[in-house]
Structure formats: C-alpha cells, structure tokens
Image: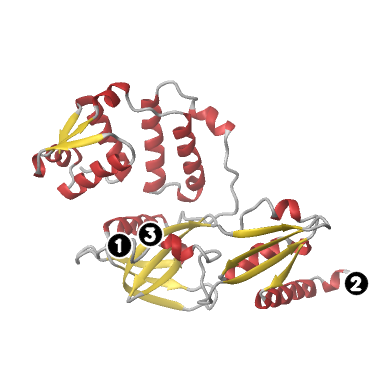
Amino acid sequence: MAVEDPWTRRLRLLQVLLRRGRISTRQVTQLLEVPSRMALDDLKALERHGVPLHHEGDGRDREWVIEEAWRQLGMDIGLEERLSLLFGRQLVESFLRDTDIGDAFARLDRQLEAMGGEVVPERDLARKFIYVREPEKDYRQHKEIVQQLVEAVVSGHYVSFTYDRARSGETLRFTSVAPYTIAVYKRGLYLISHKRGHNEVHAIERVSELVVHAEIAAFDYPRPSEYDPRPLLASQYGLASDGAKPEIVHLRFDARGRPYAAARRWMAEQEVIFRDDGGCDIIFEASGPELIAPVLSFGDLVEVIRPLSLRRRVREMLSRAVERYAGDDEA
C-alpha cells in the first residue's frame, strides 16, 4: 500500500538513495507504489530541498544519482533542523492531534531522530524550547473534514460543502469550488477556495457535508502569476476581507504602551516614530476588518488617529463595553 504522506514518502526515498546511491524512476514507482508523475515530483522535491541529485537517461528508466561525497557524509540532521521540526509540531499538534497530519509529524520526528545520530534527546528539547499555546480551535469533531480538505488541496479535486457564516448566521451551499490553499491563522485552519474568478475564505470548523469530487477531472492549479495568497494578503490585516482598499493606519501609543507596541511588527512595511513624551506612533498601510481586535487589546494604551472609520468603530465598541459595566459603581 502506498505511503500517503508526501514527506514520509520522500524521507523513505532519501534513505534508499543514501543506501544505494542511485535509483530509477521506475524503481521509485515500485518502491513507493505511486504513479510515475508522483515519483518524479518526490524526486524533484528532494532536489529543491538541497539533496544533490543529477539524472542519467530518459523516461521511466532514467536514473537519479546522489552525489557520492554527500552520500558518504550522510544526511546531516543537526540541532537547527530538530528545532525547526519541534516548533512546527508544537505549533499544530494540539489542534491537529489525532489527524493524519499530526501523526505524520510524529513519524517524521522519530525517523529524523534515528537518522540524526548524536543530537539532543527530544524530551530535553521539548523542555528547553517551547511554544506557549494561545486559545485555539478544537478540531476533534472535524478531523475527517480536515483530512479530506488537505487531500483535496494536494490532489486538486473540486469540493462541495455546506457553510455556516458566523456573523450573519446564514447557511450556504458551495458547489464544485477549487480548494486553493489551507491557511493557519490565530490557531485555526481556514480554506481559501476559488470559483469563477472569486476567492473566498472559510473557517474549516464551520464546513459540513463535504463532498470531494474525485470522480471528475482535477483542476489545474494556477501559475504563481495567476494566484499566490502571500501577495494577496500582504496589505491585508488577517484573513477576513470587507472589500475595502488599503489605507493609512496611524496608531498613537502612550509611554506605557510603547514597549509592547514598538517591539512588534504590525505589517511588513511600517514606520515607528518615537515621541518626546515617551510614547510612539506606528504608521502602516492595511485593510481588513480584523484590525480592530489587536487595537482593542491595548485598551487605553492606544488611540486611533486614522482612518476615521476605524477610530469611530473603536469608540463605539468601547462605549458599549462601558455601558455593560455602568451598574458596577452603584452596586
């Protein structure tokens, strides 16, 4: 039976290459029980990640040869690689536990530790370097949907599903949409789907009645020039979009708030102005309705100077919050 997780497959393939020195595309398909195209993708993925490979011949009989000096030296799994894996696993293990993705992290970690030789034991690393968890979404009731969506994104299969909008309470049915990207944001998982030139973001815990259309032809994943979520989100704060264009955001922090605000990067491009009174101003360009939450988290340490729309929303929300506690003085 084929090994489904891509990096478990590729690690297995790398172990064979280190032992044999060379392998043909045909042998890879037999070893991993995958189609020729997937075998080729796995070999090219190893090459992209620094494994020194070159090929000899053509077609399925083409042989992939690993550089002999690198092979004799062996795969170097050092402290930096172990820490990268440790933090990656700590980031997702709590809300992806009991899913195939969580299991894959554990398998990969065990295999890398076995290949790495004398490295700091995992039990010690996990105490010396930790990721402190924040409030997170619980996917124990949604692990099948998470796994199906991951497979659909990887394989390029269209999906249909029912979706409950949190703000409006509407229940909508999305049919035959292309699942482009799964994003991790605020300790939760989000699907970015595409249909007829429009991208939409869905919180995965609100997806139900999911159907993966594996019986029809897969869609062609767009070229980077046609779709890349990173530049699309570069000027947007968070994942939610209200369709507004980016505008200048000017936040003024007093001396109490300056150490916390100035130490953080709100957007990739920002200006920090330190004032004589000990406070600071942070200015950047952004859009998105989610900006209000981090501003409110600073309480009375911050004032929104612009845009006026954000200033007005913050004032309204703080006023309603004060009203909720209005009776405390009388009590």
* Image-based side of 18 in relation to 293, left or right: left
Going by the numbered disc 1, the residue's amino acid type is Arg
Residue sitting nearer the eye, 120 or 213: 120
x 82%, y 57%: residue: 276
Q: Which sits earlier in the primary sequence, circle 3 or circle 2?
A: 3
Tell me if label 1 and label 3 are in contact, CB under 8 Å: no
Residue sitting nearer the eye, 213 or 219: 219
Q: Which residue is mark 3?
A: 145
Q: Secondary structure at mark 1?
A: loop
Going by the numbered disc 2, the residue's amino acid type is Glu
* Image-based side of 33 in relation to 93, left or right: left
In the rendered image, residue 325, in percent from the top left (x then y), is placed at: 81, 70
Label 1 and label 3: CA atoms lie apart by: 27 Å
Q: Secondary structure at mark 3?
A: helix
Residue 68 visible in this rendered orientation of the protein? yes
x 19%, y 65%: residue: 217
* Image-based side of 40 in relation to 136, left or right: left
In the rendered image, residue 304, in percent from the top left (x then y), is placed at: 72, 69
Q: Which mark is residue 330?
A: 2
Q: Which residue is mark 1?
A: 223
In the rendered image, residue 239, in percent from the top left (x then y), is placed at: 50, 65
Residue 275's place in the image compared with 68, above or below, is: below
Query: In which image quadrant can residue 26 be found?
Result: top left
